[in-house]
Image: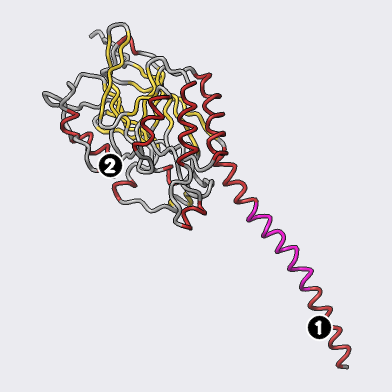
Amino acid sequence: MAKNGRKKNARRRQSERRKIIPALLISILLVVGFFGWMYATAAVVHVRPAEVYLPDLPASFDGTTLLYVSDVNIRSEADAMTSRELFETLSVLSPDILALGGDYSAQTLLDTLNGVTGGGATAAREFVAALAGFSAPLGKFAVLGEADDDSLRDVFTMAGVQLLQDEGTILERSGDRIAMVGLRDVSEDVTPYDQIGRSFLSDDCVLVLTHNPLAYTRIRMAEADGGGTWADLVLSGHTLGGQIKLFGRTLRPFTEEEARRVAGWYYGDDRPILVSQGLGCRGAKFRLGTQSEVWYLTLRRPEWKVVES
């Protein structure tokens, strides 16, 4: 009897294992598939076209195109090569202006866990140097993010990219002028917003590059010379749209002010800010509920129509 009981128990355990193993394999495949899908989502770059109507835009700049790329987040030589290849593809868009929104390097998840810093800095410099071959007739401009430092300035200069740190430059076409202003990252807390605002009149057309959308409130509070709003369009990034987002919640915690502008277009006094979800990723190269993106903007003058009474 005891022997028969042992046989029955052995058969029962064998039967249970037969049931468990397929379920375990299915679970492993689902987990691997899920992470593979998040990796694939991060790898696919979406080019977002948009027409932006700016009341102060001079007539000769109507139709000007601008390619905006933020948060490249290069962590390795492989990332640098992928980014260079992407920009070779994007060159077919032939933008008039190239604008870069900061955070050119990032840490891998392993570096983050081990407390290692600066892992992607060398690869990021190689990527920036390769921008010398990218054509943008009206200019190539950049700001720095919190992950960057001024050591990139020389590399940008060699690549023909103008790094703007609380600085502005004038773009001219057929006698008309617009301004491109780049701001230091808000984490430095040194930008003289009021002084910069007073450098312009309210009817000047000013495009602003700022890595962190938190600067938008400060930009709006500063007034132009003689009063009024000085910035016509603000381009930012930094948030990555949350990168990992599920059921409307992001894995990355945001403050109340940060949560107001996580991704997309926002308007204040009819002066828009674009918060890009960015090109790269922080830590692991995964995205969930967000997308890697670059923006291809066409600047337009509003079409005013006279209505006869």
Secondary structure state at the residue bearing disc 1? helix
Residue type at mark 1 is Asn
Does the stretch in magenta take in 234?
no
Residue type at mark 2 is Val
Q: Is residue 29 above or below residue 99?
A: below
- The residue that appears at 46% across and 22% down in the rendered structure is 132
> Furthest residue to the bottom?
1
Question: Which mark, residue 186?
Answer: 2
Q: Residue 175, position in %: x, y? A: 28, 7
Q: Is residue 22 above or below residue 144?
A: below
Q: Is residue 281 above or below residue 111?
A: above
For discs 1 and 2, the disc positioned in front in the rendered view = 2
* The N terminus sits in image quarter: bottom right
- The residue that appears at 28% across and 45% down in the rendered structure is 187
Residue 31 lies left or right of residue 60; in this view the side is right
Q: Residue 292, position in %: x, y? A: 50, 37
Task: Answer with mark 1 or mark 2, whichever residue precedes in sequence.
Answer: 1
Q: Is residue 304 above or below residue 10?
A: above
- The residue that appears at 40% across and 22% down in the rendered structure is 160
Sort mark 1 into few (<14), some (14-19) or many (20+) by Cα contacts within 10 Å. Answer: few
Residue 288 lies left or right of residue 29; in this view the side is left
Quadrant of the image occupied by residue 14? bottom right
Residue 296 lies left or right of residue 187; in this view the side is right
Q: Which residues are the magenta region?
A: 16-32
Residue 166 vs residue 243, the one in the foreground: 166
Secondary structure state at the residue bearing disc 2? helix
Decide whether the magenta segment is chiefly helix, strand or loop: helix
Does the stretch in magenta take in 26?
yes
Q: Residue 286, position in %: x, y? A: 53, 47
Residue annotated with mark 1: 9
